[in-house]
Amino acid sequence: PQADERKHPMDAAINEETLKEIIELREVNDHGGAYQFAAEKLGCNELAMRFERINKRQIELGHLPVDLYEQRHRLYQELMAFARSNLSVAMYDRLYSAF
């Protein structure tokens, strides 16, 4: 296979069941939950804990204020940078599309 088609060891962390769960979370508008779940599956425990804190705060407030949205977006960018470095191109694309 060509370099961009190779499987990466972390691809196993993001399987069909994981992708389905991420899509289900997104479909009920739980984007933060989807990011947290993906971070957990990829072994990014610190990122997962940070997403969890934002998610809890959003629930407490009843909405996602701009500052929390911006924090969450920065964490999402970190998560996706990690995914891009550690997943095959095909699996990264599937994960990206699930969000």
Image (cartoon, rainbow, N blue to C red):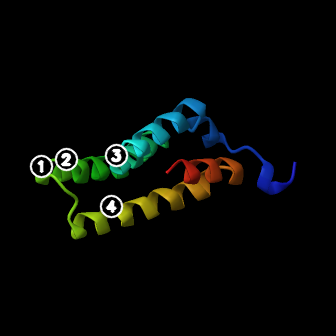
Instruction: Tell me the residue that label 4 is attached to.
Output: 72
Q: Earlier in the sequence, mark 2 or mark 4?
A: 2
> Which numbered disc, 3 or 2, marks the residue closer to the eye?
3
The kind of residue tagged 3 is Asp
Kindly report the distance in space between the C-alpha atoms of the residues bearing marks 4 and 1. Answer: 16 Å
Residue furthest top in the image: 17
Question: Tag 4: Cα neighbours inside 10 Å, few (<14), some, or many (≥20)?
Answer: many
Q: CA distance from mark 2 to mark 4?
A: 12 Å
Q: Position of residue 55 (x, y in %)?
A: 25, 49
Q: State the residue lying farthest toward the left.
A: 60
Residue at 34% x, 44% y is 33
**Which residue is labeled 1 in the image?**
60
Residue 66 image offset from top left, x and y in percent: 24, 69
Q: Identify the mark nearer the N-term, 3 or 1.
A: 3
Q: Which residue is mark 2?
A: 56
- Where residue 38 sits, quadrant-wise, is top left
Q: Earlier in the sequence, mark 3 or mark 2?
A: 3
Mark 1 Cα-neighbour bin, 10 Å: few <14, some 14–19, many ≥20: few
The amino acid beneath tag 4 is Arg
**Mark in the foreground, 4 or 1:** 1
The foreground one among 19 and 62 is: 62
Would you place residue 54 above or below residue 77 in this image? above
**Which residue is label 3 attached to?**
30
Given contact means CB atoms under 8 Å apart, are the residues at marks 2 and 1 in contact? yes
The amino acid sitting under disc 1 is Glu
Of mark 4 and mark 3, the one earlier in the sequence is 3
User: Which tag is nearer the camera, tag 4 or tag 3?
Assistant: 3
> Residue, x 60% and y 58% (percent of image)?
85
Between the C-alphas of marks 2 and 1, the distance is 6 Å
Number of numbered discs present? 4
